[in-house]
Amino acid sequence: MNSSAVAADPGRARFARDMLALALLRAVAPFQIGSVAAVSPLMSADLRMSATELGLLVGIYMLAGLLISIPGAAVTRRYGDLRVLCVCLVAMTAGALMLAAADGYGGALAGRAMAGCGGVIITMVTLRMASEHFAGPRAATGMAVVVASWPVGIGFALLAVGPLAQAIGWRSALLVPAVLPLAFLALRDWKRMAAPPAAPGRVPMLALQRHEWGAVALLCVGWFCYNGWAAAINAFTPLWFVEQGRSVAGAAAMSSVMMMSCAVALGVAAAVHPGLLAIALAAVVSPAGRTGAFGLFSFSANAGLLLTPVVAGALVDAAGTAGAALALGAAVAALVALGALPHRR
């Protein structure tokens, strides 16, 4: 998309601006997730964490989200996207500051959980906002870019925070993902797309039709596996590169290349085949059930992001090498294809 074409078509310019705004907003949470992986060799030594404890620290970001994903969908309908997302951005900053200042493992877990409460809801709501805002021939492109912003956020965190941690220390480096959410409070583009509060009255937590449950369930399995794979790779790839003799900065850079490559592959595949995962969810669910469906979708993602790093960490402790986590990630990635089953005709 060249600049002259965008300038000649105000609709295309608006689409590009809105797509970028939602993609960047959604990338804040994975940037915070990736920042812990980027500093994990230094943090693990300082806080004396085992690989299992590191996996839990990565995964606990999603634990609170696992509990609040479905009710969180109802909360956003009741109070409106704008109010809820602003509170979430503040929670992400507060939790990240707690992590940077933690003097023990317990404090680090508490900070990650607080940041995760905000990050999970933002991730869920931005996907739903994209599904409602983008329509017509540009819908697949818009959703593909928003979905692919997740591995991009992780990749940029590995690329930026790892070298910074080696230069100024991991605590100082973690101030970057702490301050980043505050910047979005001042941006206006994403606020234009925020849905208003629902009309007064009872707000159902889920509003799916009986015939929609099967397709939604299979899509959630695929989304669980995709996020679980990404979490395992994100958490332990830097440690594996360090085992191979790379520096902390070099390990983070190599891991970033891996995540960026995955983001490109996901974006291309999603744009070519609209039946993939998050893009398909909006197609198989009625508008009335979309908020609840994305709540379930977020629940499955959080479960994958929480459970897979913990299992991977236990495998690393048992095997004595981070390669065990990468093998688990590869096995889980192979199951992502289940998400396409509801759309085979």
Image (cartoon, rainbow, N blue to C red):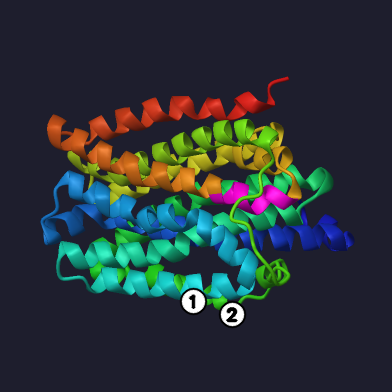
The residue furthest bottom is 186
Label pair 2/1, CB-CB below 8 angstroms: yes
Residue located beneath label 1 in the image: 182
- Does the rendering let one see residue 244? no
Q: Tell me what residue is drawn at x 42 percent, y 63 percent.
A: 117
Alpha-carbon distance for marks 2 and 1?
8 Å
The local crowd at label 2, few if under 14, some if 14 to 19, many if 20 or more residues have their Cα within 10 Å, is few
Q: Quadrant of residue 240?
A: top left
Which residue type carries mark 2? Answer: Ala
Front residue of 139/42: it is: 139
Instruction: Check if residue 171 falls in the magenta segment.
Output: no
Residue located beneath label 2 in the image: 186
Location of residue 18 in the rendering, given as x and y in whole percent from the top left corner: 71, 62
Q: Quadrant of residue 278?
A: top right
Which image quarter is the C terminus in?
top right
Which residue type carries mark 1? Answer: Leu
